[in-house]
Amino acid sequence: MEMQLTDHILRVVGLDETEKAILVSRFERRNVARRAALFGPKDSAGDLVFVEKGLLRLYSVDDEGKDKTFQFGVEGCWLADWSGFGETGAPGFSIQAIEDSRVVLIRRADYEPLLKAVPPLERYFRQVYQRAHKAAQRRARLRAASSAEETYRQFQRRYRGFVQRVPQYMLASFLGFSPEWLSKIRAKTS
Amino acid sequence: MEMQLTDHILRVVGLDETEKAILVSRFERRNVARRAALFGPKDSAGDLVFVEKGLLRLYSVDDEGKDKTFQFGVEGCWLADWSGFGETGAPGFSIQAIEDSRVVLIRRADYEPLLKAVPPLERYFRQVYQRAHKAAQRRARLRAASSAEETYRQFQRRYRGFVQRVPQYMLASFLGFSPEWLSKIRAKTS
């Protein structure tokens, strides 16, 4: 379901006309074709990416070519490289579209000034990051308390529609399993 | 180094006298002796815990008695069970002191009303959760890109003072290693 960033923000906080105008002036809307890179490991400077339509992922590829997905973003989600690795010269995360997508970028350099200029956004982003923290805690707990198979089934039950939109090897690396293991489990289920 | 919660907040945002008074009226200061539980799996309703002095951990024990640490909190850190598992009847996380500690509790029921009453706290907590997200991203990346041994060494370099305050088996479970593995590595280093 498509989700305009402005609507997403207005669900949480009220903005007056001046604040709305400032906000929109900092938006950069972009279409990203399926499989295209939005940011590679060299150019992700931590810009904030809001998904209005489609599906993207935040991932890295290590020296041995191993591809690991750390985060997925569907409509209404934020993705950003907060690691700061890029700034130290180490490769940052990459962001790539899994489906044809439309995103809104907020440049990292604009982010703190935007929050100063539009203070209600503090509440909005507080909730965004609080929810991310909550999701990470739930996922870590689930992984620790369950077998790999149970984790996958619970994840599938909770995010059924989403699981069908994602290639198997990406989901496997996100959940920390080998792709072979996931194929075996899926064969048993279907 | 001790850290008063009020000072920690005033580093980030300004508060007037009325706001300070409201804030302090929602604080509950508590001493927790070394090894004592602040919250067990049945009574952690997601209250927010700020560490003024000492060291605590957020952890769970599974059905087979396996103890897994998910988060440590030293002076200046927040710990809270955001998972919501407690509310669904499943056991929540537990929080326990590793050293004699002094904490400030904010009751979960008071948290959102407090943010409404003292709006600058939105900015403060936005930064708290943004930093938690950043740390989680860095840790996940480090784990994925490095061998277990390298992860441990990098963690040790970055948090040298902290590593010495924590029992070995807790650190091992936090980093996702077996205690035996960590003993072997430490023996090699010393």
Image: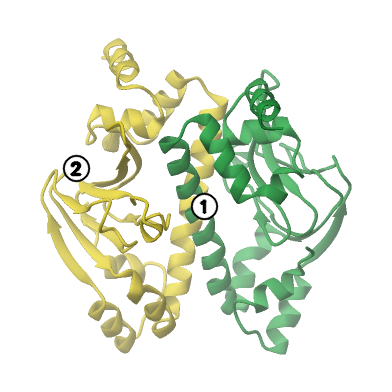
Chain colours: A green, B yellow
* Secondary structure type for disc 2: loop
Q: Nearer the viewer, mark 1 or mark 2?
A: 1
Q: In the drawing, does residue A180 fall left or right of residue B120?
A: right
Chain letter for mark 1: A
Q: Few, some or many C-alpha atoms within 10 Å of disc 1 (few <14, some 14-19, many ≥20)?
A: some
Q: Is residue A58 among what the camera can see?
A: yes
Q: Which residue is mark 2?
A: B98
- On the image, which quarter does residue B26 sit in? bottom left
Please state which amino acid type lies under the numbered disc 1. Answer: Ala
Residue A108 pos. (x, y %): 66, 57
- CB contact under 8 Å: marks 1 and 2: no
Q: Residue at x 49, y 54 (%)?
A: A133
- In the picture shown, does residue B23 fall above or below A2? below
Q: Which residue is mark 1?
A: A135
* Secondary structure type for disc 1: helix
Please state which amino acid type lies under the numbered disc 2. Answer: Ile
Q: CA distance from mark 1 to mark 2?
A: 26 Å
Residue A163 pos. (x, y %): 70, 43
Chain letter for mark 2: B
Nearest to the observer: residue B35 or residue B130: B35
Q: Is residue A44 among what the camera can see?
A: no
- In the picture shown, does residue A111 fall above or below B75? below
Residue B52 pos. (x, y %): 22, 58
Q: In the drawing, does residue B67 fall left or right of residue A119?
A: left
Most extreme residue toward the left, as rendered? Answer: B33
Nearest to the observer: residue A147 or residue B150: A147
Image quadrant holding the N terminus of chain A, namely bottom right
